[in-house]
C-alpha cells in the first residue's frame, strides 16, 4: 500500500521505523526540509495546512493518516469523497483540532470533562470563577496555547483569540490511556500510564506504567474509553489525557487523534507498541496485544535552557551502559530550549526501581549544543 502521513516529525518517523518490517511504501508531507521523516520516506516538503497541497499529496495514496492534528481537515474530507481512505476520518480530526468543538463533543456524549465556557475574544464576560484555565481554540500543542489564570492581575493577560475557559480540577494524578479501533470495529486499549509534567516547560517529563488504580477509578476509565470509541465512529488510534482529582473522579482533559508522547514507553514495555498498533489500524489488520510486560517508563530528551545549535547529547555513553535502558533519537540535528529531541525508555522490576532509574537517567544526560 501507498501510505501517506501528514507531518514528518518523530511520531511519523517511529511509525515508519516500526512498519519497515512489513511491505508498504510510506510518503510524508512536512514544511521542514530536514524533518525527521525526510530520509526514511518518500518525502514532500510542503504545508499540511494548505488545501491544494494536502489534496495533491493524498490523491494517489491508498490511505492518508496524520502524526499531527493541525492539518487541513477540509482537504482530507475532499480526499474521502474521491475514494481515498483517511484514518482517523476528517470529521473527528476537525472536531479534535478545535478545542471548542472537542469540549462540545464531550458534553454532547456525556463524557466527563471539566466545566467550560466558550469566549470568542477577551472582551466577553467570563462567568467561570477564578482560578481557571484558558485554552486557545486552535493551534495549541506541547503545552503551548494553554495558560492558568489565577487572579485579577492574570486576567489582564487573557489572550484575544477564541478560547475555551475551563474550570480548574484539583488534580491528584495526570493519566493517559491510548485506545485503538480498526475499520472492522475491533478495539484495543493500552494499560493506563501516569504522566509527570515538567512544571517549567509544561511538557511531559516522565511517563510510567502500570498505574495501580482502585477498581472504581479503573471502571470510570473503562466507561470513558468504551463510550469514546463508540461515538467517535472512526478507525484510529487516540490518546485520551485524563485528570484524576483528589476525590477519585476521572475527567477527560483532551484527546489527541494520533500517536502520542504518553505511549512511547510501550516500545519496550508492552507486548506491542503504539506504533505497531497504529500501523495495524491504518491497514485494517487484527489489532495487537497491548499487555504490559513489566514496569516501564519514559523520559523526554528536550533541549537544555541556554543552548541552541548543532545538538550534542552529553552523558549518553553512561546511559548506554545501563541495563534495560533504550535510547530513541528523533534525527533532529539542531537543538533549542524545550525542543523534543528524543526519549529514553527504561524497564524495571518495581515502581521504586523504575523511578530511581528515570531520575538517574535525567541527571546523567543533557541535550546541549
Image (tube, grey):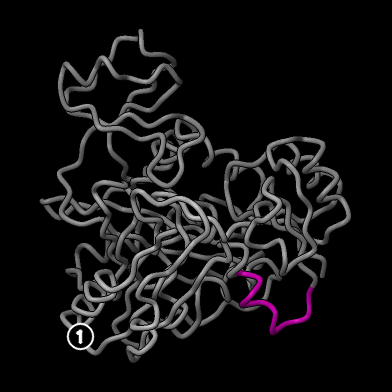
- Circle 1: is it few (<14), some (14-19), or many (20+) Cα within 10 Å? few
Quadrant in the picture for the C terminus: bottom left
Q: Position of residue 362 (x, y in %)?
A: 28, 69
Q: Residue at x 20, y 41 (%)?
A: 169
Residue bounds of the magenta highlight? 15-24
Quadrant in the picture for the N terminus: bottom right
Residue 147 found in image quarter:
top left
Near-viewer residue (105 or 283): 283
Query: Would residue 234 be found to the left or right of residue 251 on screen?
Result: right
Q: Position of residue 87 (x, y in %)?
A: 67, 56
Q: Is residue 19 magenta?
A: yes
Q: Is residue 115 above or below residue 14?
A: above
Q: Is residue 58 above or below residue 51?
A: below
Near-viewer residue (349 or 277): 349
Q: Residue at x 62, y 62 (%)?
A: 12
Q: Which residue is mark 1?
A: 350
Query: Would residue 74 be found to the left or right of residue 261 on screen?
Result: right
Query: Would residue 156 be found to the left or right of residue 50 on screen?
Result: left
Q: Is residue 138 above or below residue 209?
A: above
Near-viewer residue (93 or 188): 93
Residue 320 found in image quarter:
bottom left
Q: Residue at x 65, y 56 (%)?
A: 35
Q: Secondary structure at mark 1?
A: loop
Q: Position of residue 163 (x, y in %)?
A: 41, 25
Amino acid at each position: 500500500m501507498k501510505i501517506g502521513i501528514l507531518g514528518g516529525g518523530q511520531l511519523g518517523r517511529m511509525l515508519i521505523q516500526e512498519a519497515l518490517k512489513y511491505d508498504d511504501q510510506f510518503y510524508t508531507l512536512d514544511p521542514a526540509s530536514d524533518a525527521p521523516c525526510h530520509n526514511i520516506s518518500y518525502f514532500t516538503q510542503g504545508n499540511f495546512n494548505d488545501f491544494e497541497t494536502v489534496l495533491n499529496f493524498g490523491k494517489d495514496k491508498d490511505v492518508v493518516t496524520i502524526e499531527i492534528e493541525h492539518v487541513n481537515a477540509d482537504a482530507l474530507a475532499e480526499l474521502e469523497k474521491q475514494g481515498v481512505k483517511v484514518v482517523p476520518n476528517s470529521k473527528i480530526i476537525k472536531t479534535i483540532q478545535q478545542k471548542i468543538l472537542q469540549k462540545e463533543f464531550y458534553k454532547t456524549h456525556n463524557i466527563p470533562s471539566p466545566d467550560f465556557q466558550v469566549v470568542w475574544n477577551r472582551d466577553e464576560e467570563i462567568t467561570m470563577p477564578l482560578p481557571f484555565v484558558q485554552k486557545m481554540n486552535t493551534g495549541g500543542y506541547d503545552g503551548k496555547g494553554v495558560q492558568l489564570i489565577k487572579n485579577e492581575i492574570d486576567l489582564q493577560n487573557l489572550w484575544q483569540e477564541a478560547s475555551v475557559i475551563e474550570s480548574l480540577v484539583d488534580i491528584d494524578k495526570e493519566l493517559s490511556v491510548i485506545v485503538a479501533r480498526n475499520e472492522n470495529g475491533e478495539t484495543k486499549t493500552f494499560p493506563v500510564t501516569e504522566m509527570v509534567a515538567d512544571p517549567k516547560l509544561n511538557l511531559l517529563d516522565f511517563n510510567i506504567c502500570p498505574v495501580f488504580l482502585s477498581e472504581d477509578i479503573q471502571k470510570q476509565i473503562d466507561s470513558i474509553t468504551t463510550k469514546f470509541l463508540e461515538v467517535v465512529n472512526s478507525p484510529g488510534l487516540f490518546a485520551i489525557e485524563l485528570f484524576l482529582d483528589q476525590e477519585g473522579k476521572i475527567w477527560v482533559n483532551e484527546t489527541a487523534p494520533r500517536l502520542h508522547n504518553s505511549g512511547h514507553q510501550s516500545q519496550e514495555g508492552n507486548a506491542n507498541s503504539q506504533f505497531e498498533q497504529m500501523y495495524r489500524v491504518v491497514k485494517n489488520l487484527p489489532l495487537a496485544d497491548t499487555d504490559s510486560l513489566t514496569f516501564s517508563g519514559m523520559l523526554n530528551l528536550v533541549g537544555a535552557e541556554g543552548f541552541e545549535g548543532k545538538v550534542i547529547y552529553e552523558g549518553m555513553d553512561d546511559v548506554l551502559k545501563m541495563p534495560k535502558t533504550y535510547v530513541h533519537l528523533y534525527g533532529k540535528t539542531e537543538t533549542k530550549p524545550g525542543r523534543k529531541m528524543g526519549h529514553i525508555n527504561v524497564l524495571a522490576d518495581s515502581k521504586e526501581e523504575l523511578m530511581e532509574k528515570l531520575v538517574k537517567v535525567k541527571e546523567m544526560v543533557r541535550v546541549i549544543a
